[in-house]
Amino acid sequence: MGKRFITARDIDELTERGETELCLDANTVVTDVARERARERGVSLRRGEGVAAQQDAPVSPAAAGSLEAAPADAALAAAVRRAVVAHLGHEPAGLQGVIARILQKRG
């Protein structure tokens, strides 16, 4: 099986769908730019099953438990993100983290 490369565009598409975590297998390579984009957007890069537990990016507050425990919060976070991006025309740095902190406080 060949290598699969994750690029900054892949991270952008992931966050546009409201996702905050990407599971990687042993054949997946994350470019340096994609790794940085993931950090900027609060996306956790995790190695999947069968691979030594290794994290490529810090755990975002969302991935730390608040959004995983409540699927409704994940949908709300995605909707808020989309609304902010639509209103501003871009995603401000740290938006995902801000949304996650707000959802944690309300919970």
Image (cartoon, grey):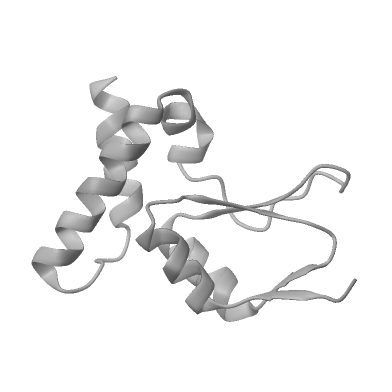
Q: Between 76 and 97, which is closer to the camera in this rendering? A: 76
Q: Residue 23 at x, y = what percent?
A: 66, 51
- How many discs appear? 0
69 sits to left or right of 1: left
Res 105 → quadrant: top left
Q: Residue 64 at x, y = what percent?
A: 52, 34
Question: Which residue is farthest top?
Answer: 107
87 sits to left or right of 92: left
Res 82 → quadrant: bottom left
For the N terminus, the quadrant is bottom right
52 sits to left or right of 42: right
What residue do we see at 26% from left, 38% from top?
Answer: 76
Q: Residue 62 at x, y = what percent?
A: 44, 39
What residue do we see at 44% from left, 39% from top?
Answer: 61
Q: Between 29 and 13, which is closer to the camera in this rendering? A: 13
Question: Which residue is farthest front?
Answer: 1
Q: Between 7 and 61, which is closer to the camera in this rendering? A: 7
What residue do we see at 65% from left, 78% from top?
Answer: 31
Question: Which residue is farthest left?
Answer: 87
For the C terminus, the quadrant is top left
Figure check: 45 above or below 75: below
Q: Residue 90 at x, y = what percent?
A: 22, 73
What residue do we see at 67% from left, 58% from top?
Answer: 56
